């Protein structure tokens, strides 16, 4: 290993070899009975008893670059550091994946050449995941109050981001241009009767919100937040934690807390409970800076249509994976974009 922790020159180890090694229970010193393997768009995740290990794929996209071991190491270090903000006792130190002189892989990089880096973390009880709790009908207002408390403290301790107001406001126009192009692409056959009305409503909302977006930056309401605040990342343990911060692109983490909770509330509404968005909004209270209704509406519409776009793009990027899922999901998001009033629903009105 070099002084910077990068691999020395040597025979390449394929991704398949790494995945095979990490899928074997005998790989791990804590001797798990089994290893469950999950493939995502950007990583391989190994659920090994009480621990989880994540191996980043050597991929490169417009929004991230994991193409070299050095870049993956940096991403692993960033993931551990950034996620400790909302899950302080969960993430371990970055783990080197090494290969010895005998050609055998090991989780002790000090004994040989480092061929990759892993995120290592403690495993959380899956039944306490917010998405699972919604599905089981176990979610209560008290749980959402705990999430609001956690986020209120997090945002309150996070300094304002350094970003030009027009750059912040302009990024929404740039992203929405992509969203509109995908949602109206005849080849993707969305065929959603509400689409034209949803797009027109968004256009009106953005025109009204644009100066307010700039004001949010000037008032210090844009921070380096989580970046991907979805129900599957929230765990309602004794002390709630939020995992899987968007570590690979800082620009995508520069957000208005109002935007992030609109995203989380909208995703919960898609799963069923429509009262969560309003409970979060009212639970964070003054931490959101008393935003005008038009801004609340804008963030809701933007997030829902963006998620509709990303759903459809699965049909282009990974057409072989659950193709039956994405078009109906995109339609649900388009329909949700027309219901921004859920964000300001009083908790007692659920």
Image (cartoon, rainbow, N blue to C red):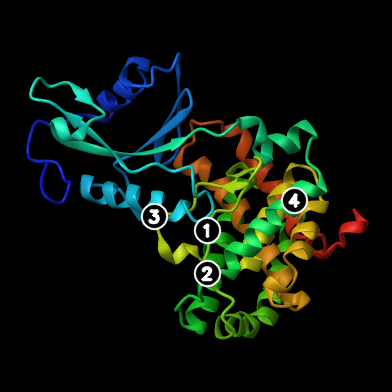
Q: State which tag comes first along the sequence, 2 or 3.
A: 2
Tell me, for residue 248, which label it has, or none: 3
Query: At 80% from the left edge and 46% from the top edge, which residue is drawn?
Result: 273
Report whether residue 318 is seen.
yes
Identify residue for label 1: 227
Q: Callout 3 environment at 10 Å: few (<14), some (14 to 19), or many (20+)? A: some
Tell me, for residue 144, which label it has, or none: 4
Distance, label 2 to label 3, CA atoms, is 19 Å
Of discs 3 and 4, which sits in the foreground? 4
Q: Callout 1 environment at 10 Å: few (<14), some (14 to 19), or many (20+)? A: many
Circle count: 4
Residue 243, x across and y down, in percent: 53, 46
Distance, label 2 to label 4, CA atoms, is 21 Å
In the figure, is residue 233 to the left or right of 203? Answer: left
Identify residue for label 2: 158
Distance, label 3 to label 4, CA atoms, is 28 Å
Q: Secondary structure at mark 1?
A: loop
């Amino acid at each position: 290993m070099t002084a910077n922790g990068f691999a020395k020159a040597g025979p390449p180890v394929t991704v398949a070899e790494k995945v095979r090694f990490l899928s074997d229970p005998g790989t791990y010193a804590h001797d798990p009975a089994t290893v469950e393997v999950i493939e995502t768009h950007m990583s391989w995740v190994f659920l090994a008893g009480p621990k989880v290990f994540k191996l980043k794929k050597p991929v490169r996209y417009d929004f991230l670059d994991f193409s070299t071991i050095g870049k993956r190491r940096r991403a692993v270090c960033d993931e551990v550091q950034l996620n400790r903000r909302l899950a302080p006792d969960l993430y371990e130190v970055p783990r080197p994946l090494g290969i010895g002189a005998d050609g055998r892989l090991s989780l002790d990089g000090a004994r040989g050449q480092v061929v990759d880096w892993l995120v290592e973390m403690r495993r959380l009880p899956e039944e306490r995941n917010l998405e699972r709790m919604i599905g089981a009908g176990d979610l209560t207002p008290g749980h959402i109050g705990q999430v609001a408390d956690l986020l209120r403290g997090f945002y309150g301790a996070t300094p304002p981001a350094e970003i030009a107001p027009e750059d912040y406001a302009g990024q929404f126009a740039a992203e929405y241009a992509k969203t509109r192009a995908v949602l109206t692409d005849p080849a993707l056959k969305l065929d959603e009767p509400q689409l034209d009305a949803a797009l027109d409503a968004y256009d009106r909302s953005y025109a009204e919100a644009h100066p307010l977006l700039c004001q949010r930056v000037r008032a210090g309401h844009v921070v380096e937040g989580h970046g991907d605040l979805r129900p599957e990342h929230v765990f309602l343990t004794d002390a709630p934690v939020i995992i899987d911060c968007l570590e690979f692109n800082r620009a995508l983490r520069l957000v208005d807390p109002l935007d992030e909770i609109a995203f989380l509330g909208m995703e919960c509404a898609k799963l069923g409970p429509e009262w969560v968005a309003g409970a979060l909004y009212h639970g964070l209270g003054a931490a959101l800076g008393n935003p005008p209704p038009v801004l609340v509406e804008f963030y809701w519409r933007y997030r829902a249509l963006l998620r509709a776009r990303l759903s459809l793009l699965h049909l282009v990027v990974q057409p072989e994976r659950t193709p039956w899922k994405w078009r109906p999901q995109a339609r649900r998001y388009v329909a949700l974009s027309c219901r921004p009033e859920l964000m300001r629903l009083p908790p007692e009105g659920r």
